[in-house]
Amino acid sequence: MGNGSESKVFVVGWPIDHSRSPIIHNYWIEQHGLKGSYERQACPPEDFERFLASMEGAGFIGGNVTIPHKEAAFRGVGWCDGTAQALGAVNTLWLDGGQICGSNTDGYGFLANLDDLAPGWSSVENLDRGALVIGAGGASRAVVHALVERGFKTVVIANRTLERAQQLAENFGPACLATGLADALDRLPAPAFVVNTTSLGMGKNVELPIDVSGLPEDTLVHDIVYTPLVTPLLGAARKSGLRTVDGLGMLLHQAVPGFERWFGIRPEVTAELRALVLAGTKDAP
Ligand code: NAP
């Protein structure tokens, strides 16, 4: 945590221009009247190790790590918590006695958003019914881990490349089953929860990852893609009368633990912050 002097925090990635994290953290810094700054740091992969080593000397107390450095950050920290170890990826860094420490807050953000906007979504009955996760990339790892930790008895992972889904399922234990996209709903016909973690639906990509029209009427459909806010999947789910949650809140909530760690204040995800970040995503690719 910072003392009387200004606390400098970064988000590092390559590219980094479109990161919305500065909007979130600078909003909270201002809201709480703190002496601090949160800035973008562009860093190509070949320079990342050097960037980490220079973090303290450059006056930073911590930072966020985004694509493509989350795995390199995991390898580069002196200590990381159990979640980062389970995911093999770090998105939040801080210094403790000169040692670089790391955590991964993506799964926390995913759960906190759903707890906030869809209370009861992981009731005992829904844990028994199971969840369908579409996609098996980096974000899916955090989502599958979070669902298993929350207690879902069955987590079906459906991916275009079956091998990646199989690897993920092997990693996260017997609750997880791997399948291709076409078979997703055959493996779990009445899921309590469906989430898209692929980039399908992002920008001009309008393809639907699965057909939601036959899902039970109480299935909750979530998309972690938030550009656009209402993806084709969420649009189709709403048309079928299903409850939906968009992905913006995951981005906002995953920022909370880092801010608390750096500044010693637990910030709130408010409607005002959501509107601010939404306005900042208008020009996003
Ligand atoms: P990633 O590691 O590159 O994984 C991409 C996933 O999308 C893979 O499962 C890939 O399948 C699938 N995919 C891509 N193109 C496809 C296509 N044409 N047809 C079928 N499947 C396709 O990416 P990521 O880091 O997991 O991110 C995925 C999305 O989540 C991005 O849109 C990102 O913005 C979003 N995200 C949101 C948040 C949030 O806070 N809301 C956080 C993290 C990520 P294959 O394995 O077959 O290639």
Image (cartoon, rainbow, N blue to C red):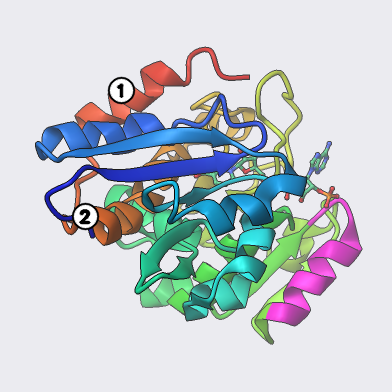
Residue 123 in the magenta stretch? The answer is: no
> Of all residues shown, which one is farthest toward the top?
283
Q: Which mark is residue 24?
A: none
Q: Which residue is mark 1?
A: 276
Q: Which mark is residue 2?
A: 2
> Of all residues shown, which one is farthest toward the front?
57
Going 21% across and 53% down the picture, which residue do you hit?
263
**Residue 20's image quarter?**
top left
Q: Position of residue 90 (x, y in %)?
A: 56, 62
Q: Is residue 250 left or right of residue 162?
A: left
User: Of helix, strand and loop, which one carries label 2?
Assistant: loop
Going 64% across and 39% down the picture, which residue do you hit?
43
Q: CA distance from mark 2 to mark 1?
A: 26 Å
Up-down relation of residue 163 to residue 229 (above or below) = below
Residue 188 seen in this snapshot: yes
User: Ligand 1: does it lie within 8 Å of the C-beta at label 2?
Assistant: no
Up-down relation of residue 112 to residue 188 (above or below) = above
Image quarter for ligand 1: top right
Q: Is residue 220 left or right of residue 203?
A: left
**Residue 44's image quarter?**
top right
Going 66% across and 79% down the picture, which residue do you hit?
172
Q: Position of residue 2 (x, y in %)?
A: 21, 55
Label 1 Cα neighbours within 10 Å, binned few <14 / some 14-19 / many ≥20:
some
Residue 170 in the magenta stretch? The answer is: yes
Q: Position of residue 255 (x, y in %)?
A: 37, 49
Residue type, mark 1 in image? Leu
Which of the pair 201/282 is nearer the observer? 282
Which of the pair 174/47 is nearer the observer? 47
Magenta span main SS: helix
User: Of helix, strand and loop, which one carries label 1?
Assistant: helix
Residue 129 seen in this snapshot: no
